[in-house]
């Protein structure tokens, strides 16, 4: 992957070679340093999974990348259009599914676009529904539609399926792969699930003590089989990096 040689700290949008470029990023909360001198590149259209123990700083990294937190130390370059989906769907209960998806976007064409994208996520029949009447999986589909309607160059997913049952989670994983192929955006997926990372991503990272300590390329063609020896070898490696022996 191309390493940025001419990074300009005053430019906030990513250079052409990378969707994301993070250099020497440090994040502290009071006395504690959560992220330390962190460097990360994500190529356009690349799917990256981010693993790490609870409290290792995964969400902190996403928040900084999403522009939700200030960047005090280091540089972060990202595309203009970024979207985040969180573990909880964060839909406004007093607005219909369609109005949640078009939140902040004015004009009839957005209504139409919302219809199209809700079809894509399998919610074409629930466009006028209230969020409270949706199942957990449906609500996350709506959240994905809301994230994708602006055609982000970078889609960040912070444990989006953690609260879903195993079967729904598998369906959502397939949906994310389909949407990724269709929309061609870079994806940064935070997950606790090594198998999820291996099923979806081009590359998996393990965050530990404020740094990316392990980085694994996942070369297998998709759809991937858990029984594939290459899958098993990578699973062992990632679990090892997370301190779980198999
Ligand atoms: N606003 C804040 N103020 C103080 N400390 C914070 C703040 N946000 C996060 N932290 C601390 O930073 C560390 C990393 O938190 P973060 O939420 O990024 O972890 P995480 O890897 O996403 O964990 P999880 O897997 O449980 O979601 C934690 O110790 C947390 O307490
Ligand atoms: Mg988190």
Image (cartoon, helix red, strand yellow):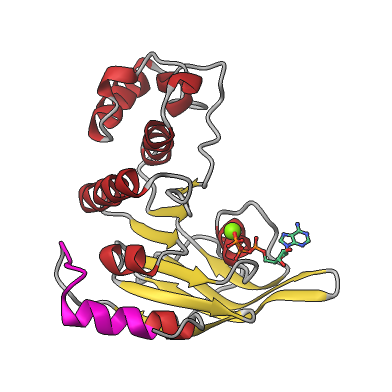
At 37% from the left edge and 31% from the top edge, which residue is drawn?
138
Q: Is residue 152 visible?
A: yes
Q: Answer with the quarter of the image where residue 125 lies.
A: top left
Give me the residue at 56% from left, 21% from top.
Answer: 93
Q: What x and y, as percent, mark residue 214?
A: 45, 85
Counting from the top left corner in percent of width and height, residue 48 is at 37, 67
Q: Quadrant of ligand 2?
A: bottom right
Q: What residue sits 54% from the left and 76% below the top?
A: 207
Relative horizontal placement of residue 134, taking residue 210 as reference (left or right) = left
Can I make out residue 3 in this image?
Answer: no
Instruction: Out of 119 and 235, give the one closest to the viewer.
Output: 235
The residue drawn where x is 34% and y is 83% is 236
The N terminus - image quarter: bottom left
- Of 6 and 157, which appears nearest the observer? 157
Residue 8 inside the magenta-drawn segment: no
Q: Position of residue 39 (x, y in %)?
A: 53, 80
Which quarter shows the C terminus?
A: bottom left
Q: Is residue 219 above or below residue 105?
A: below
Region in magenta: 223-237
User: Up-down: is 181 above or below 194?
Assistant: above
For residue 187, above or below residue 231: above
As drawn, the residue found furthest toward the front would be 246
Magenta stretch holds residue 234: yes
Q: Main secondary structure of the magenta part?
A: helix
Q: Position of residue 144 (x, y in %)?
A: 39, 40
Looking at the image, residue 184 lies above or below residue 9: above
Q: Residue furthest right?
A: 31
Of residues 142 and 26, the one nearer the viewer is: 142
In the rendered view, does 5 fall on the left or right side of 31?
A: left
């Amino acid at each position: 992957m191309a390493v940025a040689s001419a990074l300009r700290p005053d430019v906030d949008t990513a250079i052409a070679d990378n969707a994301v470029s993070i250099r020497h990023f440090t994040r502290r909360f009071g006395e504690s340093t959560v992220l330390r001198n962190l460097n990360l590149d994500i190529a356009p259209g690349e799917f990256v999974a981010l693993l790490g123990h609870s409290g290792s700083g995964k969400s902190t990294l996403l928040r900084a990348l999403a522009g939700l937190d200030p960047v005090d130390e280091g540089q972060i370059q990202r595309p203009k259009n970024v979207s985040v989906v969180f573990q909880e769907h964060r839909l406004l209960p007093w607005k219909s599914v369609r109005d949640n998806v078009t939140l902040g976007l004015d004009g009839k064409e957005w209504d139409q676009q919302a219809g199209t994208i809700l079809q894509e996520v399998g919610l074409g029949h629930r466009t006028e529904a209230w969020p409270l009447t949706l199942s957990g999986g449906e609500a996350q589909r709506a959240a994905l539609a809301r994230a994708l309607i602006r055609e982000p160059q970078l889609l960040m997913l912070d444990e989006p399926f953690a609260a879903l049952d195993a079967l729904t989670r598998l369906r959502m994983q397939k949906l994310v792969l389909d949407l990724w192929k269709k929309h061609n955006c870079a994806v940064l997926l935070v997950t606790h699930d090594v198998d999820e990372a291996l099923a979806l991503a081009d590359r998996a990272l393990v965050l530990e003590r404020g740094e990316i300590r392990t980085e694994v390329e996942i070369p297998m063609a998709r759809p991937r089989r858990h029984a594939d020896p290459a899958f098993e070898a990578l699973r062992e490696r990632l679990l090892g990096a997370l301190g779980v022996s198999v």
